[in-house]
Image: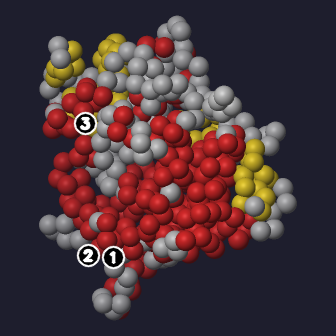
Amino acid sequence: MDTRPEPFVPPAPTPRTTPPSTLEMMRIVYRNPLELWGEPSYNEPWISVNGVGGPLVIANDPGLIRHVLVDNARNYKMATVRQMILRPILRDGLLTAEGDVWKRSRKAMAPVFTPRHIFGFAQPMLARTLDFVQRYDDVTGTVDVAQDMTMLTYEILAETLFSGEIAGEAGSFAHEIDRLFETMGRVDPLDLLRAPEWLPRLTRIRGRKTMAYFRKIVTDTVAMRSAKLARNPDGAPEDFLTLLLRAEGPDGLSRQEIEDNIITFIGAGHETTARALGWTIYCLAEATWERDRVEQEIDEVLAREPDPVKWLDGMPLTRAAFEEALRLYPPAPSINREPIAEDEYKGFKIPRKAQVLVMPWTVHRHHKLWDRPNAFLPERFHPENRDKIDRYQYLPFGAGPRVCIGMSFAMQEAIIALAILLSRFRFDTVAETKPWPVQKLTTQPQGGLPMRVTRR
Protein backbone atom coordinates (compact mmCIF):
# COMPACT_ATOMS: atom_id res chain seq x y z
CA MET A 1 0.00 0.00 0.00
CA ASP A 2 1.38 3.41 -0.99
CA THR A 3 1.41 5.63 2.10
CA ARG A 4 3.39 8.43 0.51
CA PRO A 5 1.79 11.77 1.46
CA GLU A 6 0.26 14.07 -1.07
CA PRO A 7 2.87 16.43 -2.53
CA PHE A 8 3.16 19.95 -1.21
CA VAL A 9 1.57 22.60 -3.43
CA PRO A 10 3.30 25.91 -2.70
CA PRO A 11 1.55 29.26 -3.07
CA ALA A 12 1.00 30.74 -6.53
CA PRO A 13 -1.61 32.97 -8.17
CA THR A 14 -4.72 31.22 -9.46
CA PRO A 15 -4.92 31.59 -13.27
CA ARG A 16 -7.44 34.20 -14.34
CA THR A 17 -10.64 33.06 -16.05
CA THR A 18 -11.55 36.49 -17.49
CA PRO A 19 -9.27 39.09 -19.08
CA PRO A 20 -8.64 42.26 -17.06
CA SER A 21 -9.58 45.72 -18.23
CA THR A 22 -6.76 47.94 -19.48
CA LEU A 23 -6.62 49.91 -16.22
CA GLU A 24 -6.75 46.74 -14.12
CA MET A 25 -4.01 45.17 -16.24
CA MET A 26 -1.71 48.15 -15.62
CA ARG A 27 -2.31 47.92 -11.89
CA ILE A 28 -1.60 44.18 -11.87
CA VAL A 29 1.54 44.51 -13.98
CA TYR A 30 2.94 47.12 -11.62
CA ARG A 31 1.93 45.27 -8.45
CA ASN A 32 2.75 41.70 -9.53
CA PRO A 33 2.82 40.53 -13.18
CA LEU A 34 2.56 36.89 -12.06
CA GLU A 35 -1.11 37.54 -11.22
CA LEU A 36 -1.92 38.65 -14.77
CA TRP A 37 -1.88 35.34 -16.63
CA GLY A 38 -5.07 33.43 -17.38
CA GLU A 39 -5.94 29.81 -18.02
CA PRO A 40 -4.85 29.87 -21.71
CA SER A 41 -1.31 30.83 -20.69
CA TYR A 42 -1.03 27.52 -18.81
CA ASN A 43 -2.74 25.37 -21.44
CA GLU A 44 -2.06 26.69 -24.95
CA PRO A 45 1.18 26.26 -26.95
CA TRP A 46 1.16 29.94 -27.87
CA ILE A 47 -1.09 32.97 -27.59
CA SER A 48 -1.22 36.05 -29.82
CA VAL A 49 -3.14 39.16 -28.75
CA ASN A 50 -3.09 42.89 -29.29
CA GLY A 51 -1.75 44.33 -26.06
CA VAL A 52 -1.66 47.90 -24.78
CA GLY A 53 1.76 48.50 -26.33
CA GLY A 54 1.16 46.52 -29.53
CA PRO A 55 1.15 42.83 -30.56
CA LEU A 56 1.95 40.39 -27.76
CA VAL A 57 2.97 36.75 -28.24
CA ILE A 58 3.26 34.29 -25.36
CA ALA A 59 5.40 31.30 -26.37
CA ASN A 60 4.94 28.11 -24.33
CA ASP A 61 5.65 25.40 -26.91
CA PRO A 62 9.23 24.05 -26.54
CA GLY A 63 9.66 24.00 -30.34
CA LEU A 64 8.62 27.64 -30.66
CA ILE A 65 10.84 28.59 -27.73
CA ARG A 66 13.79 26.93 -29.42
CA HIS A 67 12.94 28.74 -32.65
CA VAL A 68 12.95 32.15 -30.93
CA LEU A 69 15.92 31.68 -28.60
CA VAL A 70 18.17 29.43 -30.71
CA ASP A 71 17.31 28.57 -34.33
CA ASN A 72 16.31 32.07 -35.41
CA ALA A 73 17.91 34.03 -32.56
CA ARG A 74 19.50 36.49 -34.99
CA ASN A 75 16.07 37.82 -35.85
CA TYR A 76 15.31 38.66 -32.22
CA LYS A 77 16.59 41.49 -30.07
CA MET A 78 15.95 42.26 -26.42
CA ALA A 79 12.37 43.50 -26.02
CA THR A 80 11.89 47.24 -25.73
CA VAL A 81 9.82 47.00 -22.54
CA ARG A 82 12.43 44.81 -20.83
CA GLN A 83 15.21 47.21 -21.74
CA MET A 84 13.23 50.15 -20.38
CA ILE A 85 13.11 48.38 -17.01
CA LEU A 86 16.64 46.98 -16.78
CA ARG A 87 18.86 49.43 -18.64
CA PRO A 88 18.46 52.20 -16.04
CA ILE A 89 19.97 49.76 -13.53
CA LEU A 90 22.44 47.68 -15.55
CA ARG A 91 23.12 49.92 -18.58
CA ASP A 92 25.56 47.94 -20.75
CA GLY A 93 25.98 45.00 -18.40
CA LEU A 94 25.83 41.50 -19.86
CA LEU A 95 22.08 41.13 -19.26
CA THR A 96 21.16 44.25 -21.21
CA ALA A 97 23.99 44.82 -23.69
CA GLU A 98 23.44 43.97 -27.34
CA GLY A 99 25.48 43.69 -30.51
CA ASP A 100 29.23 44.25 -30.33
CA VAL A 101 29.11 45.43 -26.72
CA TRP A 102 27.51 42.14 -25.65
CA LYS A 103 29.99 40.09 -27.70
CA ARG A 104 32.99 41.89 -26.17
CA SER A 105 31.62 41.54 -22.66
CA ARG A 106 30.81 37.85 -23.06
CA LYS A 107 34.28 37.17 -24.47
CA ALA A 108 35.95 39.05 -21.62
CA MET A 109 34.05 37.09 -18.96
CA ALA A 110 34.23 33.63 -20.51
CA PRO A 111 37.60 32.69 -18.92
CA VAL A 112 36.16 33.19 -15.42
CA PHE A 113 33.41 30.62 -15.95
CA THR A 114 35.36 27.71 -17.45
CA PRO A 115 35.03 24.40 -15.52
CA ARG A 116 38.57 24.79 -14.18
CA HIS A 117 37.76 28.15 -12.63
CA ILE A 118 34.35 27.02 -11.38
CA PHE A 119 35.93 24.06 -9.57
CA GLY A 120 38.49 26.44 -8.11
CA PHE A 121 35.67 28.46 -6.56
CA ALA A 122 34.36 25.47 -4.57
CA GLN A 123 36.65 25.82 -1.57
CA PRO A 124 36.03 29.59 -1.15
CA MET A 125 32.28 28.91 -1.48
CA LEU A 126 32.56 26.31 1.26
CA ALA A 127 34.63 28.58 3.52
CA ARG A 128 32.20 31.49 3.24
CA THR A 129 29.22 29.22 3.91
CA LEU A 130 30.89 27.72 6.99
CA ASP A 131 31.57 31.20 8.32
CA PHE A 132 28.03 32.30 7.56
CA VAL A 133 26.19 29.46 9.34
CA GLN A 134 27.90 30.27 12.63
CA ARG A 135 25.36 33.05 13.08
CA TYR A 136 22.67 30.43 13.59
CA ASP A 137 24.39 28.87 16.59
CA ASP A 138 22.84 31.33 19.03
CA VAL A 139 19.51 31.93 17.27
CA THR A 140 16.53 31.42 19.60
CA GLY A 141 13.68 32.89 17.56
CA THR A 142 12.99 33.14 13.85
CA VAL A 143 15.15 34.40 11.03
CA ASP A 144 14.24 35.75 7.60
CA VAL A 145 15.72 33.08 5.36
CA ALA A 146 15.11 35.20 2.25
CA GLN A 147 17.28 38.01 3.57
CA ASP A 148 19.87 35.60 4.96
CA MET A 149 20.31 33.90 1.59
CA THR A 150 20.80 37.32 0.00
CA MET A 151 23.62 38.01 2.44
CA LEU A 152 25.16 34.55 2.03
CA THR A 153 25.25 34.67 -1.76
CA TYR A 154 26.60 38.23 -1.64
CA GLU A 155 29.47 37.09 0.59
CA ILE A 156 30.19 34.11 -1.69
CA LEU A 157 30.16 36.32 -4.77
CA ALA A 158 32.39 38.91 -3.11
CA GLU A 159 34.91 36.24 -2.12
CA THR A 160 34.99 34.24 -5.35
CA LEU A 161 34.67 36.81 -8.12
CA PHE A 162 36.13 39.83 -6.35
CA SER A 163 38.49 38.21 -3.81
CA GLY A 164 36.67 39.92 -0.97
CA GLU A 165 37.42 43.36 -2.35
CA ILE A 166 33.98 44.91 -2.86
CA ALA A 167 33.49 48.26 -1.19
CA GLY A 168 30.60 48.39 1.29
CA GLU A 169 29.15 46.12 3.97
CA ALA A 170 27.10 42.99 3.31
CA GLY A 171 24.36 43.96 5.79
CA SER A 172 23.67 47.33 4.23
CA PHE A 173 23.97 45.77 0.79
CA ALA A 174 21.24 43.22 1.50
CA HIS A 175 18.89 45.98 2.63
CA GLU A 176 19.65 48.26 -0.27
CA ILE A 177 19.29 45.58 -2.93
CA ASP A 178 15.74 44.94 -1.74
CA ARG A 179 15.06 48.66 -2.13
CA LEU A 180 16.65 48.70 -5.58
CA PHE A 181 14.46 45.91 -6.98
CA GLU A 182 11.39 47.27 -5.19
CA THR A 183 11.75 50.58 -7.02
CA MET A 184 13.82 50.20 -10.19
CA GLY A 185 13.35 46.57 -11.18
CA ARG A 186 9.66 46.53 -11.98
CA VAL A 187 7.32 47.47 -14.81
CA ASP A 188 6.01 51.03 -14.94
CA PRO A 189 2.69 51.72 -16.76
CA LEU A 190 4.59 54.03 -19.12
CA ASP A 191 6.78 51.06 -20.12
CA LEU A 192 3.71 49.12 -21.25
CA LEU A 193 2.66 52.06 -23.38
CA ARG A 194 6.20 52.24 -24.80
CA ALA A 195 6.34 55.90 -23.88
CA PRO A 196 9.58 57.76 -24.72
CA GLU A 197 12.42 57.13 -22.28
CA TRP A 198 12.72 60.84 -21.52
CA LEU A 199 9.33 60.76 -19.81
CA PRO A 200 10.09 60.22 -16.10
CA ARG A 201 8.86 56.99 -14.53
CA LEU A 202 7.40 58.26 -11.26
CA THR A 203 7.49 54.75 -9.80
CA ARG A 204 11.30 54.73 -10.09
CA ILE A 205 12.10 58.15 -8.71
CA ARG A 206 12.34 56.59 -5.24
CA GLY A 207 15.11 54.32 -6.51
CA ARG A 208 17.53 57.03 -7.56
CA LYS A 209 19.20 57.26 -4.16
CA THR A 210 19.63 53.48 -4.03
CA MET A 211 20.97 53.44 -7.58
CA ALA A 212 23.51 56.08 -6.60
CA TYR A 213 24.53 53.88 -3.65
CA PHE A 214 25.27 50.96 -5.98
CA ARG A 215 27.14 53.08 -8.47
CA LYS A 216 29.34 54.35 -5.65
CA ILE A 217 30.10 50.77 -4.58
CA VAL A 218 31.19 50.02 -8.13
CA THR A 219 33.30 53.15 -8.50
CA ASP A 220 35.05 52.52 -5.18
CA THR A 221 35.59 48.84 -5.99
CA VAL A 222 37.14 49.58 -9.37
CA ALA A 223 39.31 52.33 -7.86
CA MET A 224 40.67 49.96 -5.19
CA ARG A 225 41.60 47.29 -7.70
CA SER A 226 43.00 49.76 -10.25
CA ALA A 227 45.29 51.16 -7.58
CA LYS A 228 46.46 47.67 -6.64
CA LEU A 229 47.16 46.80 -10.27
CA ALA A 230 49.09 50.05 -10.72
CA ARG A 231 51.25 49.35 -7.65
CA ASN A 232 51.92 45.71 -8.47
CA PRO A 233 50.48 44.35 -11.75
CA ASP A 234 51.46 40.78 -10.85
CA GLY A 235 50.26 40.99 -7.26
CA ALA A 236 46.53 41.41 -7.84
CA PRO A 237 44.30 38.30 -7.78
CA GLU A 238 43.39 36.90 -11.20
CA ASP A 239 39.68 37.08 -10.52
CA PHE A 240 36.63 38.42 -12.34
CA LEU A 241 37.44 42.03 -11.49
CA THR A 242 41.06 41.85 -12.65
CA LEU A 243 40.10 40.07 -15.88
CA LEU A 244 37.62 42.81 -16.69
CA LEU A 245 40.19 45.52 -16.04
CA ARG A 246 42.78 43.72 -18.14
CA ALA A 247 40.22 43.69 -20.97
CA GLU A 248 39.94 47.48 -20.86
CA GLY A 249 41.02 49.25 -24.04
CA PRO A 250 40.04 50.24 -27.56
CA ASP A 251 39.46 46.64 -28.67
CA GLY A 252 38.01 45.50 -25.37
CA LEU A 253 35.76 47.05 -22.75
CA SER A 254 35.37 50.68 -21.82
CA ARG A 255 35.59 51.66 -18.16
CA GLN A 256 31.85 52.31 -18.18
CA GLU A 257 31.15 48.83 -19.58
CA ILE A 258 33.38 47.31 -16.91
CA GLU A 259 31.44 49.10 -14.18
CA ASP A 260 28.11 48.08 -15.74
CA ASN A 261 29.15 44.41 -15.70
CA ILE A 262 30.32 44.64 -12.12
CA ILE A 263 26.98 46.01 -10.99
CA THR A 264 25.22 43.32 -13.05
CA PHE A 265 27.02 40.57 -11.16
CA ILE A 266 26.88 42.23 -7.75
CA GLY A 267 23.15 42.79 -8.16
CA ALA A 268 21.41 40.36 -10.48
CA GLY A 269 24.18 37.75 -10.46
CA HIS A 270 23.75 36.84 -6.82
CA GLU A 271 20.10 37.80 -6.35
CA THR A 272 18.87 34.94 -8.55
CA THR A 273 20.70 32.25 -6.57
CA ALA A 274 19.63 33.80 -3.27
CA ARG A 275 15.96 33.62 -4.21
CA ALA A 276 16.26 30.04 -5.44
CA LEU A 277 17.94 28.95 -2.20
CA GLY A 278 15.23 30.58 -0.11
CA TRP A 279 12.41 28.94 -2.06
CA THR A 280 14.17 25.55 -1.85
CA ILE A 281 14.52 25.71 1.92
CA TYR A 282 10.88 26.78 2.24
CA CYS A 283 9.55 23.97 0.03
CA LEU A 284 11.61 21.37 1.90
CA ALA A 285 10.33 22.69 5.23
CA GLU A 286 6.74 22.16 4.04
CA ALA A 287 7.49 18.80 2.39
CA THR A 288 9.19 17.18 5.38
CA TRP A 289 9.28 13.72 3.73
CA GLU A 290 11.39 15.21 0.94
CA ARG A 291 13.55 17.03 3.47
CA ASP A 292 14.25 13.76 5.31
CA ARG A 293 15.61 12.20 2.12
CA VAL A 294 17.75 15.23 1.31
CA GLU A 295 19.17 15.40 4.84
CA GLN A 296 20.03 11.71 4.76
CA GLU A 297 21.79 12.08 1.42
CA ILE A 298 23.77 15.12 2.59
CA ASP A 299 24.83 13.37 5.80
CA GLU A 300 26.04 10.31 3.89
CA VAL A 301 27.99 12.30 1.29
CA LEU A 302 29.63 14.64 3.78
CA ALA A 303 30.71 11.67 5.88
CA ARG A 304 32.72 10.19 3.01
CA GLU A 305 33.52 13.04 0.60
CA PRO A 306 35.33 16.19 1.83
CA ASP A 307 35.83 17.70 -1.63
CA PRO A 308 32.96 20.13 -2.38
CA VAL A 309 33.70 19.95 -6.11
CA LYS A 310 32.18 16.45 -6.08
CA TRP A 311 29.03 17.32 -4.16
CA LEU A 312 26.98 18.50 -7.15
CA ASP A 313 27.22 15.10 -8.85
CA GLY A 314 27.21 13.21 -5.56
CA MET A 315 23.94 14.69 -4.23
CA PRO A 316 21.27 13.99 -6.88
CA LEU A 317 18.35 14.31 -4.44
CA THR A 318 19.57 17.66 -3.13
CA ARG A 319 20.13 18.88 -6.67
CA ALA A 320 16.65 17.67 -7.67
CA ALA A 321 15.02 19.59 -4.82
CA PHE A 322 16.86 22.75 -5.87
CA GLU A 323 15.93 22.27 -9.53
CA GLU A 324 12.29 21.68 -8.65
CA ALA A 325 12.26 24.91 -6.66
CA LEU A 326 13.78 26.61 -9.72
CA ARG A 327 10.92 25.20 -11.77
CA LEU A 328 8.20 26.43 -9.44
CA TYR A 329 9.84 29.77 -8.70
CA PRO A 330 12.16 30.61 -11.61
CA PRO A 331 14.36 33.51 -10.47
CA ALA A 332 13.96 35.14 -13.89
CA PRO A 333 10.24 34.55 -14.58
CA SER A 334 10.17 36.02 -18.10
CA ILE A 335 12.47 36.18 -21.13
CA ASN A 336 11.49 39.01 -23.46
CA ARG A 337 12.35 39.25 -27.14
CA GLU A 338 11.26 41.38 -30.10
CA PRO A 339 11.46 40.23 -33.75
CA ILE A 340 13.45 42.49 -36.06
CA ALA A 341 11.51 41.18 -39.08
CA GLU A 342 8.25 39.27 -39.31
CA ASP A 343 8.74 35.63 -38.41
CA GLU A 344 6.81 32.40 -38.82
CA TYR A 345 6.80 29.06 -36.98
CA LYS A 346 4.69 26.17 -38.33
CA GLY A 347 2.24 28.59 -39.93
CA PHE A 348 2.05 30.83 -36.84
CA LYS A 349 3.02 34.38 -37.81
CA ILE A 350 4.90 36.63 -35.39
CA PRO A 351 4.58 40.30 -36.37
CA ARG A 352 7.58 42.59 -36.55
CA LYS A 353 8.10 44.50 -33.29
CA ALA A 354 5.75 42.20 -31.38
CA GLN A 355 6.63 41.63 -27.76
CA VAL A 356 7.45 37.92 -27.51
CA LEU A 357 7.32 36.53 -23.99
CA VAL A 358 8.99 33.24 -23.20
CA MET A 359 7.90 32.90 -19.60
CA PRO A 360 9.53 30.24 -17.47
CA TRP A 361 6.78 31.00 -14.96
CA THR A 362 4.02 29.70 -17.26
CA VAL A 363 6.15 27.18 -19.19
CA HIS A 364 7.25 25.56 -15.92
CA ARG A 365 3.60 25.25 -14.80
CA HIS A 366 2.09 24.36 -18.16
CA HIS A 367 -0.52 21.61 -17.98
CA LYS A 368 0.47 20.11 -21.33
CA LEU A 369 4.14 19.84 -20.37
CA TRP A 370 4.11 18.70 -16.73
CA ASP A 371 2.24 16.20 -14.58
CA ARG A 372 0.78 17.95 -11.49
CA PRO A 373 2.58 21.15 -12.51
CA ASN A 374 1.79 23.11 -9.34
CA ALA A 375 3.13 20.49 -6.94
CA PHE A 376 6.61 20.30 -5.44
CA LEU A 377 7.86 16.96 -6.83
CA PRO A 378 11.68 16.77 -6.86
CA GLU A 379 11.46 13.26 -8.34
CA ARG A 380 10.95 14.93 -11.74
CA PHE A 381 14.66 15.70 -11.65
CA HIS A 382 15.93 12.42 -10.25
CA PRO A 383 18.55 10.88 -12.58
CA GLU A 384 16.19 8.25 -13.98
CA ASN A 385 13.61 10.92 -14.96
CA ARG A 386 15.72 13.75 -16.31
CA ASP A 387 15.63 12.57 -19.93
CA LYS A 388 11.85 13.00 -19.97
CA ILE A 389 12.21 16.80 -19.69
CA ASP A 390 12.59 18.68 -22.97
CA ARG A 391 15.49 21.13 -22.98
CA TYR A 392 13.10 23.95 -23.85
CA GLN A 393 10.39 23.27 -21.30
CA TYR A 394 12.75 23.99 -18.39
CA LEU A 395 14.46 27.36 -18.61
CA PRO A 396 15.68 28.63 -15.23
CA PHE A 397 18.89 29.88 -16.85
CA GLY A 398 17.47 30.74 -20.27
CA ALA A 399 18.70 29.16 -23.50
CA GLY A 400 20.55 29.94 -26.68
CA PRO A 401 23.43 32.40 -27.16
CA ARG A 402 22.34 34.40 -24.12
CA VAL A 403 22.06 31.47 -21.73
CA CYS A 404 23.24 32.49 -18.26
CA ILE A 405 27.04 32.53 -18.24
CA GLY A 406 27.06 31.81 -14.50
CA MET A 407 24.83 28.71 -14.61
CA SER A 408 27.54 26.26 -13.48
CA PHE A 409 28.74 28.73 -10.85
CA ALA A 410 25.20 29.03 -9.45
CA MET A 411 24.53 25.28 -9.38
CA GLN A 412 27.79 24.53 -7.56
CA GLU A 413 27.22 27.38 -5.13
CA ALA A 414 23.66 26.27 -4.36
CA ILE A 415 24.54 22.65 -3.61
CA ILE A 416 27.46 23.62 -1.38
CA ALA A 417 25.28 26.09 0.51
CA LEU A 418 22.41 23.62 0.93
CA ALA A 419 24.78 20.84 2.02
CA ILE A 420 26.23 22.92 4.83
CA LEU A 421 23.00 24.60 5.89
CA LEU A 422 20.91 21.40 5.97
CA SER A 423 23.62 19.23 7.52
CA ARG A 424 23.82 21.46 10.59
CA PHE A 425 20.42 23.07 10.93
CA ARG A 426 16.76 22.36 10.34
CA PHE A 427 14.50 25.06 8.98
CA ASP A 428 10.79 24.97 9.88
CA THR A 429 7.94 27.23 8.93
CA VAL A 430 6.07 29.21 11.57
CA ALA A 431 2.67 30.87 11.66
CA GLU A 432 4.13 33.97 10.02
CA THR A 433 5.58 32.04 7.08
CA LYS A 434 3.12 33.05 4.38
CA PRO A 435 5.20 33.91 1.32
CA TRP A 436 3.56 35.12 -1.84
CA PRO A 437 5.54 35.05 -5.10
CA VAL A 438 5.96 38.51 -6.59
CA GLN A 439 7.74 39.31 -9.83
CA LYS A 440 10.17 42.18 -9.60
CA LEU A 441 13.54 41.68 -11.21
CA THR A 442 13.37 38.17 -9.74
CA THR A 443 10.62 36.00 -8.22
CA GLN A 444 10.63 37.20 -4.64
CA PRO A 445 8.69 36.02 -1.58
CA GLN A 446 6.55 38.95 -0.47
CA GLY A 447 6.73 39.15 3.29
CA GLY A 448 10.05 37.31 3.35
CA LEU A 449 10.59 33.78 4.66
CA PRO A 450 10.44 33.90 8.46
CA MET A 451 11.49 30.47 9.71
CA ARG A 452 12.59 28.76 12.90
CA VAL A 453 16.16 27.43 12.86
CA THR A 454 17.23 24.63 15.18
CA ARG A 455 20.35 22.49 15.47
CA ARG A 456 19.98 19.05 13.97
Q: Nearer the viewer, residue 34 or 139?
A: 139
Q: Secondary structure at mark 2?
A: helix
The three-letter amino acid code for the residue at tag 2 is: Arg
Specify the amino acid type for callout 1.
Thr
Residue lying at 63% horizontally and 56% vertically, measured from the top left: 296
x and y, in percent, of residue 435 in the image: 68, 37
Q: Label 2: which residue?
A: 246
The residue under label 3 is which amino acid type? Leu
Q: Residues within 10 Å of mark 3 (few under 14, many from 20)?
A: many
Q: Position of residue 140 (x, y in %)?
A: 85, 60
Figure check: 174 above or below 1: below
Check contact, mark 2 vs mark 1: CB within 8 A.
Answer: yes
Please determine whether, in this image, residue 283 is positioned above or below residue 7: below
Relative to residue 451, is residue 66 drawn left or right?
left
Q: Which label was assigned to residue 242?
A: 1
Q: Residues within 10 Å of mark 2 (few under 14, many from 20)?
A: some
Looking at the rendered image, the quarter that the N terminus falls into is top right
| Residue 278 seen by the camera | no
Residue 317 falls left or right of residue 229: right
Question: Nearest the camera: 207 or 129?
Answer: 129
Residue at image coords 17%, 13%: 347
Q: Residue furthest front?
A: 1
Residue 47, percent from left and from top: 34, 15
How many marks overall? 3
Q: Residue at x 57, y 30 (%)?
A: 375
Residue that carries the numbered disc 3 in the rendered image: 69
